Image (cartoon, grey):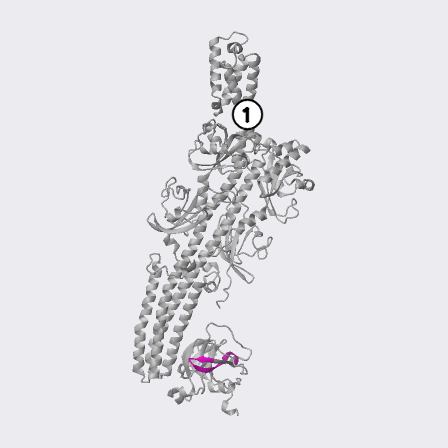
Amino acid sequence: MKSATAEKRFSIFDPAIRFEHREFYERIVSELNGLLPVCNQGESTAVEISENPTEQEQITELMKRVESFSGDLLDVTKKLFDQYYVAKEALHRSILTTTAYNKINTLDRNLLERTCDVRWWALETAFSACLASYGRGLEQSRRLVALFTGDELPSTSESVVDSSGSVGADHLDSSLAGIFAELADFPTLLQSGALANFRLRFEAWRTDRGPHGAFRKQMEVFSRTLEELDGSIKLSCDRLEDIRHSYTLYRDIVLTTDDGRIVANANPDERERILGLSISGETWFRKALETRNGTEYHAQDLGPSAVENCLSLVYATAVRESSNENGRGIGALGVFFDFQGEAALILEEYMPRDEKGETVEGALSMFTDSQGTIIASTDPACLQPGQTAHLPRGNRTLESGQRTSQYMVFEGLESAVFSARTDGYLDYSGLGWSSHVIVPKAHLFELAAPADEIGISAEELMDSRIIPDINKQTYLRVQDDKESIQLISLNGIVFASKLGKRGGALGPIFNQITRTGDFVTSRMEDLLKEMALGELELNLKALENFSKQAIDLVDRNLFERAADIRWWATDEYFWNALENPTADNFHKASERLKVINGSYTMYRNIVLANDSGDIVACSRTELRNELAKINVSDQSWFQMGMRTGRSQEFAVQDVQKSLLEKAKNRSLVYSGGVRKRGARSGESVGVLGILFDWDTEAGKILSTCLPCDSSGKTIEGSAAFYTNAKGEVIETTSPDTFAVGSKLDLPQRALRLAKGETTSSVFRVGDASYLLGSSRTKGYREYEGLAWCAHVVRPIGKNVGMN
Amino acid sequence: MEYAAFLVGEHLFGIPVMLVQEIGKPVDVFPVPGHDPRVSGLVNLRGRTAVALDLRRSLLGPEHGYAHTDKRKFIVLETTDALPNEAREMGLDSHREPLVLIVDEVQGVLDGERLEFHPPPAHVAERHVEGVMKVNDRLMTLISIPRLVEDLLPRKEETP
C-alpha cells in the first residue's frame, strides 16, 4: 500500500466510480454550492437589520465560516470516494491474488503426493517380478528362435522332427513357422490376449508334436516362463487396478519394459488398446529410465501420449531390479494423473458468485503452463486449452511465487486479472505453472450488501480495528465538520434570538444552513458506513475463503489417507501374516509397516490387528511389546474396519482418545479390512489401522489459513480451528482462547452450515468480539469428510487511541 | 423569552438565550489548585481568560464527575457589561467576569412563550432554580446564573 492510499487515484470521473456514487457526489456539490447565495443573503440581511458594526461583523464571520466549511466538506467528499475505491481495490487484490495463488498451490500440493505415489509404487515387488519374468521370456525366446533358424544348432531339422515321424513336413513347417515367427517378435505377445493365445497354440504343439532331447527341455522351461509371465502380468494389472481403485485421481497407470513396451496397466477399459504398445519415443519413459535411484522421479508437463487420447500429465520413475531402491532400472512406471478433472474442480472453487450461487458473468479462471499456454480453464470457449493466454505482460512473466494484478479489457468487459505463479510445495518444485482469476471491474466495485443480519452495527465497525485508520480519520473529520456546522447554525440561532424581532429575518438562513449541513454530513456518514460495510464484507469474504481453504486442505489430505489405507490393506505381507500367523510373518509384516511409515511421515504409527482384535504388528517396532498386550476389538476403527466388505471401502474413527496412544489426547485412526490373498471383496481376516499425526498435520494447515495485514503479518488475535460434528474444537492455533475439547457457543449460521457451505458471522464470546468465517466439509472426490467445520476468526477489537 | 436548552447528565436545563454569547466545542481547561471542585478551572477564549463551571458537579452533586460524551459543549456567557439592552430591560443579569458552562449536550433554542411555566417546587432547596418548564413530556429546569455564581464564586471585593 505505502503511499498509494495517500495519493488520489480515483477521480470522481474514473469510469470505475459507480453511477450511484457520482450522482451522490453531484448532489453534495450542488447542496454545498447552494449555501453560497444563502451566506451572501445572510451578510446583506445583517446590514439590513442592524446598524451595529459589531453585530454585522459577527454575522459576517459566521457566514464566512459556513463558506469555508462547505469548501472543506467538498474536499473531504472527494477524498472519501478516493479512499472508498482505493480500499475496495486493495482488499479485492489481496483476496483474489491469494485465491489465484491458492488454486495453483492446491494443485501443487496434490501433485507432490503424486510424486510420492509413483516412487513408492515403483518399488512394488509384483512389478519388478513381472518385468524380470518378461526379461527371461525375451531371452529364452531369442535362444529358441536362434535354435530354430539354425544359427546355433547344426541339426535343426532332426531335433524338431516329431519322434513318430508320421507328421508331414509341410504341416510341421507351417505350424512351427507360425510359432517361431511370433516368437521372433516376442514383445508383440504383450498385446492384450496375445500371450494367452500363443500359449494355447504353443502348448498344443508342444504336447502333440514337441521335440525330444535338450530342445524339449528348453521348450519346457520356456513354457513355464510363459506361464509365469502370463500370471505376473495379470497380477501386475490387478495390483495397478487396486491402486487406481484406492487412489481415484489417476486415469491410468502403466508399467513398461525397458524398451518401452506396455506390460500392464490399471484401467481395464483401455487395456486392450494399450497393452504391448510401444511408447519408447515418449519423453516421460526415457526420463524415467534415466532416474538413478528410487528417490528420483520425472514430472512430464502436459503433452500428448499414446497411452491416452487427451493431454497427459505423467509422473514416472524406473522400476528397479528386485524392487531394490538402488537396483538397475528394468522398466518404467508412469502414472497418468487426472489433470483435467482435478483442474476443473480447483478452478471452479472460490469464484465470485451472485445471489443465485452462479459464477458472476465474466468471472473466469485458468491455469497456464510455463510458456503461457492455457492448460485448463473454466470456460474453454473463450479460454481454449492449447492456446496462448492473452494476458498483460506483467501477468505472463511472473517469478516463482509472485502474485500480481492488472486491469484489462477481456471479452469486451473492463476486468481485473489476478495472477500467481507457483513456487512449488515442499519438495515438489512444480512445473512453472501460473493461475489466473479474471473478474469484471464492475463486480469489484459493487455496492456492499446491507450487513444487518451479520449482527454488527456500522458504528461498532467504525470503531473497530477492522477499518483502516485512514477511513476512521475521515469519519472523525466528517463528524467534526458536522458538529462545526451544527454549532455555526446554533450560534446563528442564538444570535438571531438575541436580536429579538429584528433577528427573525436571519432564522430561515440559519435553518437552511442547518438543513444543508445535516444533509451533507449525514449522507457522508452513510457513505462512510457503506464503505465500512464494504470493508466488512470483504474481510468476511477473506475469512470465509480461509476457512474454506482450511477445510479443503484437510479433506484433500484425508482423502490421501483414505487412499493409503485402502491400498496398503491389500499388501501381501499383511494378508500373508494373518493367514499364516507365525512370529516370523508378523515380524516381516512389522518390517514392511516400518518401511511404509518411513516414507509416509504423516503417520504416528500403523498397526495390524487380527480378527480377534489383537495387535500383531506395528510400524513403530519399539512399541511392539506394549501394543501386543492391547486388544482393540471394542474400538470403532477396528469394528468398522472388520465390517468393510470390499477393498474400495475404508473406515475412520473420528478424532478421540485412543488405547493405542496413551500419551496423546486425540488420535485419528483410519482403517481398512485385510482380506484373504488381498482379494478385492470378501470377509476381513484382520484390520490395518493407521494413526494419522492429526495435531501436527492439522496444525500445519491451520497456521497457513490465518488472515494477514497488508504487510503479510498475521493479524494479532486471529485464530483458526476445526470443530467436529458435535461442535467440539478438535484442533486449534490458539489453545488459550479456543482450546481443544471445548464446545464453543458459535453463531447459529456457523452451526447450521450444510455440507460444502461457507458463511460468515459475528462471534461474541465473553467480552471479545470476532469476525468469523466458517466452512463445513464438502469432502473431496469419494472421500466424504467427517462433517467437520473449519473456522477462522479475527478480532473486531476496539480501536485503541482513537477515542 | 427564549431559552438555550442543554443536558447535564440526563436532566434538561435552560438559561435565557440573551445570556449566551456563543456555544463552542470543548477546549483545554487548566485546573487551578484550591478551587471549589464544582469549578473546573480556567479556559482561554481567544485571548480572554474565563472561569469554567462544571455543571455536572454543580447541578447534580459532587459525586457526578466527568463523564465521557462526544457531544460535550462549552456555553460562553455574556459578561454583565456586554448584555444587550433587551436583556437588561427584562431584568436579566449575568456575571461581570467571563464565564463558561460545561454541559453534556446542547439541545437548541426554545421559545418560552409557548411553554408552561411552574415556580420552583417546594421541595427544591437550591436557590439557583428559578422554575420549571414543561417541554413536551419532559421538564426543563431554569437556572439563575447570578445565584449559581454567587454560590460558587466568592466575591473578590469582599475578601480583604
Crowdedness near tag 1: few (<14), some (14–19) or many (≥20) residues, C-alpha within 10 Å: many
Mark 1 belongs to which subunit? A
Is residue B48 one of those drawn in magenta? Answer: yes
Q: Is residue A495 above or below residue A708?
A: below
Residue B144 visible? The answer is no
Look at the numbered disc 1 and give the secondary structure of its residue.
helix
Residue in the image at 59% along x and 36% along y:
A569
Name the quarter where the N terminus of chain A is drawn: bottom left
Residue B117 picture location, percent across and down: 44, 83
- Viewer-closest of B90 and A605: A605
Q: Would you say residue A609 is visible in this rendering?
A: yes
Q: What's the residue type where badge 1 is placed?
A: Ser
Instruction: Tell me residue A592's x, y (percent).
Output: 61, 36
Looking at the picture, how far across and down is residue B9, in whole percent?
Answer: 50, 76
**Residue A99 screen position, x and y as percent:** 45, 49
Q: Is residue A733 left or right of residue A536?
A: right
**Residue under numbered circle 1:** A133
Above or below — where is B90 with respect to A691? below
Which of A293 and B39 lies nearest the eye of the viewer?
A: A293
Instruction: Please name the predominant secondary structure of the magenta segment in the image.
Output: strand
Is A629 drawn above or below residue A281 in the view shown? below
Q: Residue at x 40, y 64 (%)?
A: A526
Q: Nearer the viewer, residue B109 or A156?
A: A156
Towards the viewer: A5 or A205: A5
Query: Which region is colored magenta?
Result: B43-57
Q: Tally the numbered discs.
A: 1
Q: Is residue A306 magenta?
A: no
Residue drawn at (33%, 66%) of the image:
A29
